[in-house]
Image: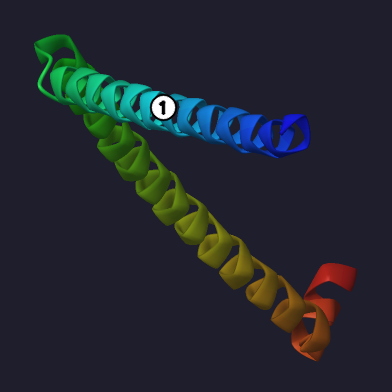
Amino acid sequence: MLHHTRPLAFVIALGLVAACSRHDDSQAASDLKGAGHDVDHAAGQVAHDADIKAAEAQFRAAGRDAGRDFRKAAAEARAAARFLAADTRHAAHDVTHSNPRDERDSNS
């Protein structure tokens, strides 16, 4: 009879361990679910916080200002590059198309 009780005791012990394990899993799942709700609630509060919204508006305004400044600087650089290109073309034209009459006048 002693031989039959040991396997039975083993099966009962195994069942208790499994039950405890399921309870632990259930508790862990419940804890994670609660933590998820806490994080969701905190994120909702942050999203509706007036200071956060004001900071977001300031970042947007700074981005718009920076974009406007960059576009202005690009337009100025483009105008300067075109002016420099025109001057270079005129100088190159003057060098390559020398006028013999101008050379006579300068030698006199």
| Foreground of the two, 106 or 96 | 96
Quadrant of the rendered image containing residue 61? top left
In the rendered view, does 8 fall on the left or right side of 20?
A: right
Q: Is 67 in front, or is 108?
A: 67
In the displayed structure, would residue 67 be above or below residue 1? below
Residue positioned 32% across, 36% down in the render: 63
The residue at the far front in this view is 1
Q: Residue at x 23, y 28 (%)?
A: 40
Query: Looking at the picture, does residue 96 appear above or below residue 46?
Result: below
Q: Is residue 51 visible?
A: yes
Whole-percent x and y of residue 43?
24, 24
Q: Which residue is mark 1?
A: 23
> Residue 103: horizontal and vertical position, in percent?
84, 79
Residue lying farthest to the right in this orientation: 107
Which image quarter holds the C terminus?
bottom right
Task: Using the image as rendered, state which of residue 72 and residue 85 is in the foreground.
Answer: 72
